[in-house]
């Protein structure tokens, strides 16, 4: 049975469908002698005749052994075709991609990337995993957005710098930059110390500034809601603040001196072959980040 070839099974199925070797040959684009050779090779492999051949114009009849071979053979042909179709869809970008992300990327950059992927590949399966653990589980996904470099055998593609800004209830500070010293004893809303908050608080400590933290929340929307309510100001990355730039209840200010900028990376396992869908996602993330950076630069020049 190990000598059974898929092409011989396909020829048998064509003969069974068409009724004669001649019509099967026309359907397959073979000569009639080639069809006869295929059936002979199949019969040798299975150890018996698969067709009774009455001769003349009469159609061939499948034997009991042939019925068994054809039943399993059609299943094999169907599965082979399904595999071929799946491979073709994979090569066309219709596969699955798992992307690790975090809040501000999920809300600002990723929607544009996902939209374009879905427009180009409607059948693709995109799964987002929001994980802000440190270090992040890069080995569990195809791509991971993260705001720092990660130790290990990983590739890093820097997408953009993300500066920290002060967001405040309107009227809390005059227009323009705010001195960090002005935040001493000022009421502030903040992330928990386990998030990126230590970067901000290190800046405060270096300037001998002790803000009065009145509320902490891990969710960006919760922090912004508290600022909007007048509870206090907050120092947040620009990606977080892009969605509220036109909010009439809030003002956004540069800080002087400013905390070190976050560096946003796209990370994946080194020496890993990308699927076409993953490769396209990297391209789209790079293009989207570049467009965002250019838009910010133009906006700064126009201020």
Image: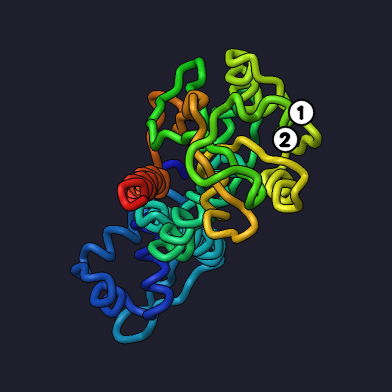
Q: Residues within 10 Å of mark 1 (few under 14, many from 20)?
A: some
Q: Residue at x 44, y 53 (%)?
A: 113
For label 2, the residue is 188
Residue 284 x, y percent position in the rendering: 37, 50
Q: Residues within 10 Å of mark 2 (few under 14, many from 20)?
A: many
Indicate whether 215 appears above or below 128. Answer: above
Task: Judge whether residue 67 can be spotted in this image.
Answer: yes
Secondary structure under the numbered disc 2 in the rendered image: strand
**CA separation in Å, label 1 and label 2:** 6 Å
Indicate whether 136 appears above or below 289. Answer: above
Front one among 30 and 145? 145
Task: Judge whether residue 49 can be spotted in this image.
Answer: no
Secondary structure under the numbered disc 1 in the rendered image: strand
For label 1, the residue is 212
Q: Residue at x 75, y 49 (%)?
A: 230
Residue 10 x, y percent position in the rendering: 38, 63
Res. 167 image quadrant: top right
Residue 277 x, y percent position in the rendering: 41, 49
Number of labels in the image equals 2
Residue 287 x, y percent position in the rendering: 33, 48
Tag 1 and tag 2, C-beta contact below 8 Å = yes
**Left of 271 or right of it: where is 130?**
right
Q: Residue at x 76, y 38 (%)?
A: 217
């Amino acid at each position: 049975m190990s000598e059974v070839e898929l092409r011989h099974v396909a020829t048998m199925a064509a003969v069974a469908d068409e009724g004669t070797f001649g019509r099967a040959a026309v359907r397959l684009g073979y000569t009639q002698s080639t069809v006869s050779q295929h059936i002979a090779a199949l019969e040798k492999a299975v150890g018996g005749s698969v067709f009774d051949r009455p001769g003349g114009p009469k159609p061939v009849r499948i034997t009991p052994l042939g019925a068994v071979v054809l039943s399993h053979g059609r299943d094999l042909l169907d599965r082979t075709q399904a595999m071929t179709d799946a491979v073709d869809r994979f090569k066309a970008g219709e596969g699955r991609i798992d992307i690790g992300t975090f809040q501000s990327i999920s809300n600002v950059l990723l929607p544009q990337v996902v939209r374009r992927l879905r427009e180009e590949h409607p059948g693709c399966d995109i799964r987002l995993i929001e994980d802000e653990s440190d270090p992040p589980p890069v080995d569990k996904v195809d791509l991971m957005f993260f705001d720092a470099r990660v130790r290990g055998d990983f590739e890093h593609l820097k997408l953009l710098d993300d500066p920290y800004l002060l967001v405040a209830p309107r009227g809390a500070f005059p227009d323009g930059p705010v001195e960090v010293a002005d935040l001493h004893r000022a009421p502030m809303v903040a992330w928990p110390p386990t998030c990126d908050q230590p970067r901000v608080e290190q800046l405060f400590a270096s300037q001998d500034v002790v803000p009065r933290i009145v509320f902490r929340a891990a969710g960006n929307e919760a922090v912004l809601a508290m600022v909007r309510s007048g509870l206090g100001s907050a120092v947040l990355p620009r990606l977080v603040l892009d969605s509220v730039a036109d909010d009439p209840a809030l003002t956004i200010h540069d800080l002087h001196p400013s905390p070190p900028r976050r560096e946003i990376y796209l990370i994946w396992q080194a020496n890993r072959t990308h699927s076409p869908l993953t490769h396209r996602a990297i391209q789209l993330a790079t293009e989207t980040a570049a467009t965002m950076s250019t838009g910010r630069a133009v906006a700064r020049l126009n201020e």
